[in-house]
Image (spheres, helix red, strand yellow):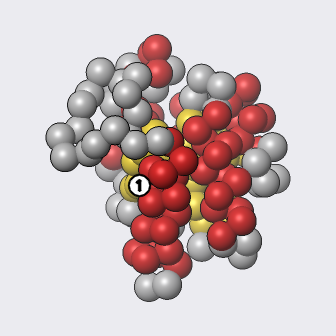
Amino acid sequence: MKIMVMDGQGGGVGRSLVEALHARYPEAELIAVGTNATATANMMKGGTAIGATGENAVVYNSARVDAIVGPIGIVMANAMLGEITPRMAEAVASSDVPILLIPMSRCNAQIMGVGERKLAENIREAVDRLGEICIQA
């Protein structure tokens, strides 16, 4: 199982995802893909030795993994203060694999039906759901 964890800015959400995924699915190949070098480096500290940075890394890896996980902004052009390019958002959203998105209040999109929860709860749910739809399938 090859899982792309994508994040931008400082990579804090991505790092938390990498840590949780690495702990739960140690056999999975985790690829940390950041919109910038800081995000990639921070995610890699969470337990993956594989990392890539930038628009081309997002486009390339989106088509070569079994699942994508990250904050909701990864499918929104110009999210994360402009770090998500339209090409990045399109590559992720157009991928033919399960995409698990963590709701974030900093994006200007409000997802109806999603209550206010702690980030750790959303990450735990994403890790559990990934197991249901990908790992155990």
Name the image quarter holding the N terminus: bottom right
Residue at far left of view: 112
* Drawn side of residue 81 relative to residue 111, left or right: right
Q: Residue at x 50, y 42 (%)?
A: 119
Please state the horizontal and vertical placement of residue 81, each as a whole percent of the image: 46, 14
Q: Is residue 31 visible?
A: no
Residue 112: quadrant of the picture = top left
Q: Secondary structure at mark 1?
A: strand
Please state the horizontal and vertical placement of residue 37, each as a whole percent of the image: 72, 27
* Drawn side of residue 33 relative to residue 37, left or right: left
Q: Is residue 88 above or below residue 68?
A: above
Please state the horizontal and vertical placement of residue 90, each as a whole percent of the image: 34, 38
Would you name the residue on which mark 1 appears?
Answer: 100
Q: Residue at x 41, y 55 (%)?
A: 100
Quick one: 95 or 20, which is closer to the camera? 20
Residue at far top of view: 81
User: Please, what is the three-letter code of the amino acid marked with disc 1?
Assistant: Leu
Residue 6: quadrant of the picture = top right
Q: Is residue 126 visible?
A: yes
Name the image quarter holding the C terminus: bottom left
Q: Residue at x 66, y 52 (%)?
A: 18
Q: Is residue 52 above or below residue 76?
A: below
